[in-house]
């Protein structure tokens, strides 16, 4: 398993923006799909966004499409989630996720995940 270190959560007003970062420790994410999930209080963990193992394609949950952008910086070995136009319903703990094996198209289900970050709280006030 790879250790994923997250940062960037916080408190923001509705309509604001935040950027989350995720850095795999001890391994690059080459050939591995990476993504983000979130879990709100009392709800199941849900998929948010992923890019493909080759970094070419992206995939988003309908609830965040057009507002969130997943990206990566190969030089910094870091994955980002840019969140714009935030809504109170985006409030959750956000988790970075790495695919359980290489060449999986996307990491968009729990079964695809091999490693999780520790989670970072995002709170959007109305």
Image (tube, rainbow, N blue to C red):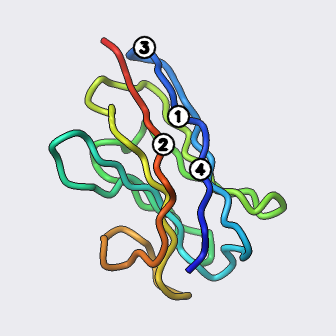
What is the quadrant of residue 74 in the picture?
Answer: bottom right
Task: State the residue lying farthest toward the right.
Answer: 75
Q: Are marks 2 and 3 in contact (CB under 8 Å)?
A: no
Q: Is residue 4 above or below residue 84?
A: below
Q: Residue at x 28, y 48 (%)?
A: 62
Mark identifier at residue 60:
none
Q: Secondary structure at mark 4?
A: strand
Q: Residue at x 27, y 55 (%)?
A: 46
Q: Are marks 1 and 3 in contact (CB under 8 Å)?
A: no
Q: Which residue is mark 4?
A: 6
Q: Which residue is mark 2?
A: 120
Q: Are marks 4 and 1 in contact (CB under 8 Å)?
A: yes
Q: Which residue is mark 3?
A: 13
Task: State the residue lying farthest toward the left.
Answer: 42
Q: Is residue 39 above or below residue 55?
A: above
Q: Would you call the spot at circle 2 few (<14 residues within 10 Å), some (14-19), or many (20 or more)?
A: many
Camera-side residue: 55 or 29? 29
């Amino acid at each position: 398993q790879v250790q994923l270190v997250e940062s960037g959560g916080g408190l923001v007003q509705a309509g604001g923006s935040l950027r989350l970062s995720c850095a795999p420790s001890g391994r690059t994410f080459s050939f591995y799909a990476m993504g983000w999930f979130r879990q709100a209080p009392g709800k199941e963990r849900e998929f948010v966004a992923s890019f493909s193992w080759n970094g070419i394609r992206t995939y988003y949950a309908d609830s965040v499409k057009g507002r969130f952008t997943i990206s990566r910086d190969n030089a910094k070995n870091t994955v980002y989630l840019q969140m714009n136009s935030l809504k109170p319903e985006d409030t959750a703990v956000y988790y970075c996720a790495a695919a359980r094996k290489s060449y999986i198209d996307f990491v968009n289900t729990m079964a695809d995940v091999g490693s999780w970050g520790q989670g970072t709280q995002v709170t959007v006030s109305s």
